[in-house]
Image (cartoon, rainbow, N blue to C red):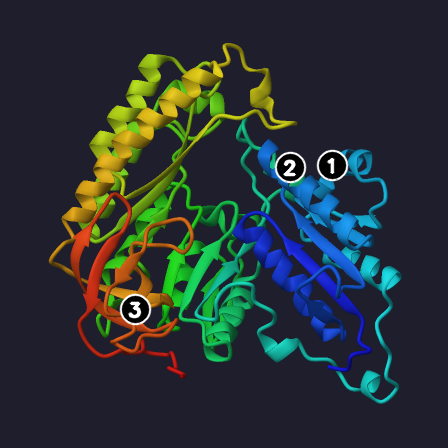
Amino acid sequence: MSAANPKVGFVSLGCPKALVDSERILTQLRVEGYDLVPSYDDADVVVVNTCGFIDSAVAESLDAIGEAIAENGKVIVTGCLGKRESLIRETHPDVLSISGPQDYDSVMSAVHRALPPKHDPFVDLVPRRMADEVGVKLTPKHYAYLKISEGCNHRCSFCIIPSMRGDLVSRPVDEVLREAERLVVRGGVRELLVISQDTSAYGVDVKYAEREWRGKPYQTRMKALCEGLAELGVWTRLHYVYPYPHVDDIVPLMAETQNGTPRLLPYLDIPFQHASPRVLKLMKRPGAVDKVRERIARWRGICPELTIRSTFIVGFPGETEAEFEELLDFLREVRLDRVGAFAYSPVDGASANALPDPVPEAVKQERLARFMAVQAGISAQKLEAKVGSTQRCIVDLVDGEIAIARSMADAPEIDGVVQIQNGREAGLQPGDFVDVEIMGSDEHDLYGEAMCEVFTLPGTAKSR
């Protein structure tokens, strides 16, 4: 692009759903002729996409806005924290514009006011195409987040997401499948990570409306979406799934293979949050813990290779020692593969703040440490059981002689990795699929050696 093109800097904070919002804004900026630059000094204006879910995220976002103002001076704010405009204005009154999450039009209007796009009378007559019809990606080339809906119909007492992102709005299934197809066919993506606030509820708001893709009808429903994605022949991983009964319908897809690869990765990310029915009721979460136990056993019976990851909150207001022990017993019984946990932290605007009997901070931290110690032992045992096995992996990067990869059980950034000791010798590169002989393990990661030549999955092209 010409050096005269207007230049925009961008700071993206928060969860993968916010990352997708950033990708869409950046794509539109590029389509309209803006240059995207990596430093404050080179930028004519800076956009900060914020997070506002918990207090630490709010502080990080405010700090990022402050840094951008100090280093550049012209700052546009968007994202979840944008729903709290008065807080931002109180701290940073000089920001040019503030908008909420997925409000792409407001962001672009603010950019146009601060930095009008360059007009070329010859180029302006040509219809604009989305950049490469794939768009700007902030993930490595070989994987991408696929956002299937916005908002959430749940009203968990610890969460303010619905107040920031609204109720559930599902994207039409054909639109999602076409985007996935573009990412795979044109973008070279080999792993799709399906994200939303509640993947299990996909389509309920549109009464599971039927649409057509590749000449075949698909309902706007989780199972139909998974069946369509399975046709692309790449790894597809589900995140943010609620343990509803209809999740049973997709587990058989995880047990089915095509050329040795599951049609749907045997991986479920399900935020259980707790195991005490009373605490779950206080959280306004589903509280049928016995049914969850039964469902996990049934899923594993259908697909023994299934990996289940989850997150939990310890020290929720009113949580007793006995209820915390109930949670530990649940962990020991169901033996989840991947687990994250957080000590409860009040979130401005959450109804849980009004609950009685807050747990002292020291007790919360002590419980968190005990929880993680129990799970570390479970994780170490489960990973040790994989020593001597062969795991199909996707390579994320090569660092010296070692390749850092992930198995089917590992989502990027939140789970463990597989360190391939002979990665460089085997000629591995990011995006390669390779079978790895597992030779060692610890509490989080596996270690092994590449066994054979690099290969591709059906429907993907290997490029070097």
The residue indicated by pointer 2 is 58
The one nearer the camera, 68 or 390, is: 68
Q: Quadrant of the N terminus?
A: bottom right
Give the vertical position of 340 relative to 323 (above or below). below
The residue that appears at 76% across and 53% down in the rendered structure is 71
Give the vertical position of 77 relative to 213 (above or below). above
The residue indicated by pointer 1 is 84
Give the vertical position of 386 relative to 285 (above or below). below
Residue mark closest to the camera, 3 vs 2: 3
Query: Which element carries disc 3, helix, strand or loop?
Result: loop
Is residue 43 left or right of 64 when viewed as pictured?
Answer: right
User: How far apart in space, not on screen, are marks 3 and 2 (Cα)?
Assistant: 40 Å
Is residue 244 left or right of 349 when viewed as pictured?
Answer: left
The residue indicated by pointer 3 is 401
The first of marks 1 and 2 along the sequence is 2
The residue that appears at 56% across and 32% down in the rendered structure is 159
Residue mark closest to the camera, 3 vs 1: 3
Identify which amino acid the numbered label 1 is placed on. Answer: Arg
Find the residue positioned furthest to the front.
400
Query: Which element carries disc 2, helix, strand or loop?
Result: helix
The first of marks 3 and 2 along the sequence is 2
Residue 137 placement (x, y as % from top left): 56, 67
Are dots 1 and 2 in contact, CB under 8 Å?
yes
Identify which amino acid the numbered label 3 is placed on. Answer: Glu
Q: Residues within 10 Å of mark 2 (few under 14, many from 20)?
A: many
Residue 271 placement (x, y as % from top left): 41, 39
Identify which amino acid the numbered label 2 is placed on. Answer: Val
